[in-house]
Every structure is written in structure tokens, then in C-alpha cells.
Amino acid sequence: MSKAIVIYYTRSGTTRKMAETISEELQKREITVDLVTPDQVDIKKLVDYDLIILGTPTYYGTMAAEIKKLLDDSIRLHGRLDGKLGGAFASSANAAGGNETAILSILSALLIHGMLVKGMAEGSHYGPVAIKSFDDRAEKECRSYANQLADILKD
């Protein structure tokens, strides 16, 4: 059985709702999921996952410091995450709030680890986004993204 970790940071709760939805959808696909915040992650254990997904609120067009610290700490795994599947999602206060750049900042780090990342042909192309709140559109994107990632793991 495939194993995934969904790591998120939140202040308002929106990013948490996104993480919970993605986790729920992956579990429906019989993927074991650990849903955690950055302070709960044992960096050394990231190598045990087939899928690593990171979620962040958007601050000044990039990821939250808590997610950045996790990625900075992951340098000790450099080369050991090669070939694993990764993804990202973000929330922001407004439509031009920097969701895409926040997601891209996470995906850049995953790519440097040698990970494979999945974009979305429909909707928010780099990964799911929530604007202002976790609405029906954001929920649909989270569920769709989780299923697309699950399809890759099942192949």
C-alpha cells in the first residue's frame, strides 16, 4: 500500500481544511496518509513516504516560514527523496495574493530533491488554491488533485 504525508501550516484554518480534504480523498483511494504540521515532522522519516504534499498560506508571495524551515531542514535528505512524488497547495487572502508563486517556491525545493511533481491541466495549474476561504471551487480542486496524485501512485 502506498504511503503519503500531507504537511501543512495554517493560521486561519483554510490551509488545514485543504489538507484535510486532500488527505480524505487519498484515503478513499486506499493510500495510508499522515496529516501533520511542520513541527510534527521527523525529517528522517520523509524517506518512508511515496508521496509528500506541502500546503501553505501565502505570505508576501511565498511559503510560510514554518514550511520553509522544514524544507531547509530536509537538506540532510538530499538525494534520498529522488523519484518520489510531490505536490503543493496554497491559500491566500485575495486572487492576486501570490498563490502561484507560493506553490512554485515549494515545487522548486521538491524538484531540487529530485522529486516528481504533478501540475493540473484544469483550474489552478500548479496545485490547488483557496482564495479568502475554503469554498466549493477549492474543495473540488483539492479532491481532483488528490485523485490525480493517487492515479500516479497506483500505476
Image (spheres, rainbow, N blue to C red):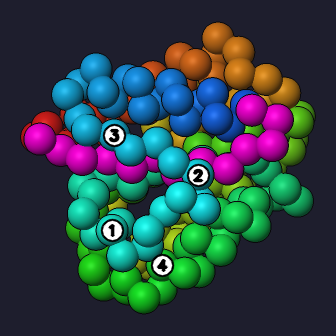
Q: Which comes before the other along the chain, label 1 or label 4?
A: 1
The CA span between labels 3 and 1 is: 13 Å
Residue density around tag 2, few if under 14, some if 14–19, many if 20 or more, within 10 Å? some
Task: Judge depth for marks 1 and 4 and give the one in front.
Answer: 1
Q: Residue at x 38, y 44 (%)?
A: 34
Disc 3 is placed on an element classified as strand
Q: Are marks 3 and 1 in contact (CB under 8 Å)?
A: no
Q: Is residue 2 magenta?
A: yes
Total marks in image = 4
Residue hosting label 3: 33
Q: Which comes before the other along the chain, label 4 or label 3?
A: 3
Residue density around tag 1, few if under 14, some if 14–19, many if 20 or more, within 10 Å? few
Disc 1 is placed on an element classified as helix
Q: Which mark is residue 74?
A: 4
Q: Which mark is residue 37?
A: 2
The CA span between labels 1 and 4 is: 10 Å
* Kind of residue indicated by mark 1: Lys
Q: Are marks 4 and 3 in contact (CB under 8 Å)?
A: no
Q: In x, y percent, where is residue 66?
A: 70, 64
The CA span between labels 4 and 3 is: 20 Å
Residue density around tag 4, few if under 14, some if 14–19, many if 20 or more, within 10 Å? some
Question: Residues in magenta?
Answer: 1-13
Q: Which mark is residue 59?
A: none
Task: Report which quarter residue 82 is drawn in.
Answer: bottom left
Task: Judge depth for marks 4 and 2 and give the one in front.
Answer: 2
**Above or below, 80 relative to 87:** below
Q: Which comes before the other along the chain, label 1 or label 2?
A: 2
Q: Which comes before the other along the chain, label 4 or label 2?
A: 2
Viewed as shown, does residue 82 lie left or right of 16? left
Residue hosting label 1: 45
